[in-house]
Image (cartoon, rainbow, N blue to C red):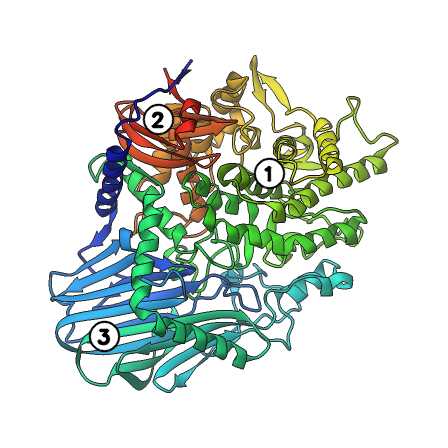
Amino acid sequence: MKKLCAVAFSGLLFLSIFSSQLQAQTNSLSSYEVTWHKQSVNSSESMPCGGGDIGLNVWVENGDILFYISRSGTFDENNAMLKLGRVRLNLNPNPFSGNDFMQTLQLEKGRVKITGGGTDVLIWVDVFRPVVHLEVKSPKAVDAIATYENWRFEDFVPVTKEFRSNSFKFPPKNIDVKTHKDNVAFSGNEVMFYHQNRIDTDDAFDITVRQQGMESVKEQMQNPLKNLVFGGTMSGTNMIPDGTVSGKYINTTFKGLRLKSAKPSWSIQLELALYVAKVGDIEQWKVGLEKIKNDAKLNAKTAERKTQDWWSQYWNRSYISIEGNTTDAKWQVGRNYQLFRYMLGCNAYGDYPTKFNGGLFTFDPVFTDSTNLGTPDHRNWGGGLMTAQNQRLVYYPMFKSGDLDMIKPQFDFYLRSLKTAELRSEVYWKHKGACFTEQLENFGLPNMAEYGWKHPADFDKGIEYNAWLEYSWETCLEFCYMMLETERYEGRNISSYIPFIESCLTFFDEHYQMLAKQRGAKIWDGNGNYVFYPSSAAETYKMTYNSTTYISALRVVLTRLTELPNSYLTDEQREKWTLMLKRIPPVPTRTLDGKMKLAPAENWARIQNTETPQLYPVYPWGLYGVDRPDLDVARNTYLYDPFCVKNHHHESWAQAAIFAARLGLTDEAKKYTVLKLQDGKLRFPAFWGPGHDWVPDHNWGGSGMIALQEMLMQTHDRKIILLPAWPKDWNARFKLHAPYNTIVEGEIRNGDILNLKVTPESRRKDVVIWHE
């Protein structure tokens, strides 16, 4: 058994140590840059680039520079997340025909650099306004042709697997589903392109409301699809229209509008200004776009500097850098941790959360699924659909990495959906509280395919007719917990989140009292506690009695809520939630093969999936683990529960690495974290997947980040526990964030902490090392 040792270090060299650590992080970033010396074969060998809320897939193929454009919030009428097109740049004479080609992702500056034949091409995205920049510097004058390529040049009907990228998932009966064409045309010396959602036809929201019997309150719900317009313009310095072209890339036919250099030039500037807005008139959208373009021109001299400054501070506020050769698995873990954090930073300020199933960086689907011949817009599991258990893994790492400014889009998503979730409870059950489902559309209702088109007339309309998803309501409590944690980590004012948290708790309180009254004369069990039946332990243990995931979530969220300062709750509110906390049953346990273990529930009817919810009291809820009571019970569960052991793996959302780290099982944590964060199968090492989802699998990367953080540092109450599951042969430098506005940084050498710096210094007394 390990034990905790308090830490006491001299503070005389903090300034010089801090400076050297900043320099070390810069050096690490330089070594982590991804460089290719050969051109790519196709879009699957693309490199991510982005900023603000725009993502580009950049690659060079047959001498042409290409990139796909994605932006947060580009949902069509079917709730597919559409790309904004593809750009192709051809230079003549072509500088990339020789052997000196190089394409590099320059992490510190957040940009892609392409060189060849003495020519430099820089591609970057303005973090603070939606503008993409491409700059060419050549030792001799070249002609340039820039083509905006669009594959939605006419209406088309999705077929077979293409439905999986929208809210229908499968071809529906008696509903005409159509992807409407974009508008693309020359406008002066620019190419203007946009998609405008129709207002004269039913969209995914309209169809879902009707399917789920919510017509009576339709006007009270938000519809993010109606009247939505998104697109932009492409223009270049001294570039003029050069007609149209057509062609086929991979499996998708496209039409292109070309701009060419008015005359050969040594310096070429190409810009795309993008705009997404929910407006009733396309002219309003054009006005908004013009403001963005004018602002970009007025601030052109400072835009690049401010963007690079943003990336510089982003990298300096957090890192984990592991020493080793580039072929070492441990070095790849440290490098890919940083690469994935870069991808998360590309949607720092989007209107919508980073999607678990590809983020902003999907590409032609045939390279993920050889039988899928769809367009580059494709991703499995929908565009506007947010699977809660997957999304949480994208956002949990942001606490220890100090990136809580980027968590706002995920919180806003739930706040926008709150009214709809409350209306579900009101319409279906006549009680209060917000009922959030696991598969949640961007308008707050369950996905129509997962809800069930064969929903029986006499079946509770509030329940999804779905073997995996029925009664899977508890994940919203994880986002309540995240909201509460922002107060604990950064002292944020979370007053605006309290109504959301209370509404989620109210649902569980009122709904399960209602169900108990329907079953019999007693509301509470013999101990005066709630009876959570029927419930669900994740998507795996179904029709459960007192689900462990319900109980753990409610226990922790209620505890954190009642611990808030007096400014957040009235005495009446605090009394209400304190009483509810007292009525939460204990976490279920059971004895198997003579060993006490955590149970997924007290009882269940069947097993439907492969998650291991019996370990959710370990993560995310932290009721068991290092330096907590009954560690052996939790370890027994991980090591000896047959279902857990069977489902230890690393793909996609699997959490074995996180559970092992939380339990101080160093060898297990190392094994699965290496599998998580080692180079993926594609050319860009952090394009993992598809696993259960799509490529690049963002809940794969997020869960890997969490595991590595938990191996290095864990926190509970006011304690900061270092090296709870860190291999002794992993030397590293780190800078992580802990609760109460605390930053912990230092070096790890042969299992020891050197040059530890804790900010503020008053928190040093709370730091302990977990030794053998």
* Position of 156 relative to 697 (above/below): below
Q: Quadrant of residue 512?
A: top right
Estimate the x, y position of residue 87 in percent, counting from the top left: 33, 71
Residue at left offset 39%, top offset 55%:
346
Residue at left offset 53%, top offset 70%:
277
Estimate the x, y position of residue 655 in percent, counting from the top left: 47, 35
Q: Quick one: label 2, few (<14), some, or many (20+) residues within 10 Å?
A: many
Element marked by disc 3: strand
Sequence-wise first label, 3 or 1: 3
Instruction: Name, please, the residue furthest toward the front.
Output: 12
Residue 268: assigned label: 3
Q: Amino acid at mark 1?
A: Ala
Element marked by disc 2: loop
* Position of 85 relative to 629 (above/below): below
Element marked by disc 1: loop
| Quadrant of the drawing holding the C terminus | top left
What is the spatial separation of the Cα atoms under label 3 and label 1, in whole angstroms? 53 Å
Q: Report the front residue among 450 and 721.
A: 721
Nearer to us: label 3 or label 1? 3
Residue labelled with disc 2? 726
Sequence-wise first label, 2 or 3: 3
What is the spatial separation of the Cα atoms under label 2 and label 3, in whole angstroms? 49 Å
Estimate the x, y position of residue 232 in percent, counting from the top left: 43, 74
Please say whether residue 43 is visible from this viewpoint: no
Q: Amino acid at mark 3?
A: Ile
Q: Quadrant of residue 604?
A: top right
Nearer to us: label 1 or label 2? 2
Residue labelled with disc 1? 538
